[in-house]
Amino acid sequence: MYTIEPNQDYRDQSLRQHGELSASQLQADAARHYDDCYRDYLFAWCNRDNLALHYGYWNSHARYDQHQALLNKNRVLYEAGGLNANHRVLDAGCGIGGSSIWMAKNHGNRVTGITISAKQAEYARQHAKRHGVADLVDFQVADFCATPFADASFDAVWALESSCHALNKGDFLREAWRVLKPGGRLIVCDGFLLQREFDEAQWQAVVTCLNGWAVPNLCSRDEITELAGREGFQNVVCHDITAQTQPSVEHMYKVAKRLQPVQKVSQWLGLRSKAQTANYLVGLAQHRLFHDKLTEYCIITAQKA
């Protein structure tokens, strides 16, 4: 049996052949992943409208295509967090700016997006200008566990499939607490483990996902809600949206299967980087995590007293 413990890096051992990676090396690895895979995401997953590097949200009573479902995720998080146009938002792990731009464009929010990739920040600025909201959004290179912002700078901290990149999830929550104003809202949306021990086949699927998305580890919903409470957050609520996420899980799996011949030939010709190949393999492995009920997908909301 294999076990995942908190605050450890469980990715490919080849990444740590000279010992554990430092915090800066972990960040550099994640940045390299997203830089290498930027065009892959735009080609196979999102588009220049939603700019989404996350799963979509599919209502049981409505039918969406993939791109609408990706946009719909922003609406669901915005409503779950009780946000309005007057809230200044920190998009912690903003990617190429999709959620920040959506908030500015649809609600007029002022949003600061941070990413550890200088290339992502520049892409996000270009996309914001194209969408006509460059005056409302600001994209910076920063670590969401140690930001350059003053205490009580934001009304909301938004982390859509980004907090998983923190080696220690408590570090992220502590920094979120610091930069939030009293009464400020925390909105976290991510995948969470349903168990800690895995057999060989399950472990390979878990590690393939960690490798492919440059994530050191995953925690459970109970662990992150307990950590949030320790930091002083109140009204901590978990919204289980696994069922509404499942169609995106299936979509990703089908896309990966469809692109398998292209991936094999491109890899054989040396046209795919290590990060791109690892990212492709996630499309297959993530399906097992959900199908075997190893993970769930939730929105966690909380408030600073």
Image: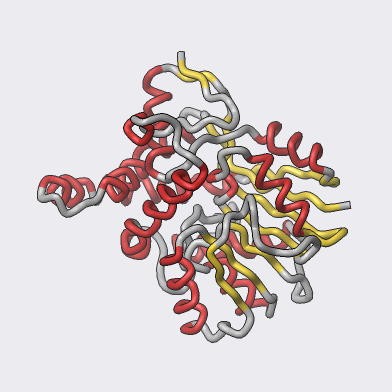
Residue 230 position in % (x across, y down): 80, 37
Residue 97 position in % (x across, y down): 52, 68
Vertical placement of residue 113 versus 269, above or below? below
- Depth check: give the residue in front, 253 or 111: 111
In the drawing, does residue 235 fall left or right of residue 148? right
Residue 227 position in % (x across, y down): 74, 37
In this view, the residue farthest toward the top is 1
In the drawing, does residue 158 fall left or right of residue 253? right
The image quarter in which residue 107 lies: bottom right
Vertical placement of residue 192 versus 174, above or below? above
The image quarter in which residue 87 lies: bottom right
- Depth check: give the residue in front, 180 or 192: 180
Who's the residue at 46% across and 17% down the image? 2
Q: Is residue 206 visible?
A: no
Q: How many marks?
A: 0
In the drawing, does residue 186 fall left or right of residue 192? right
Q: Is residue 232 visible?
A: yes
Vertical placement of residue 10 versus 35, above or below? above
Residue 62 position in % (x across, y down): 57, 60
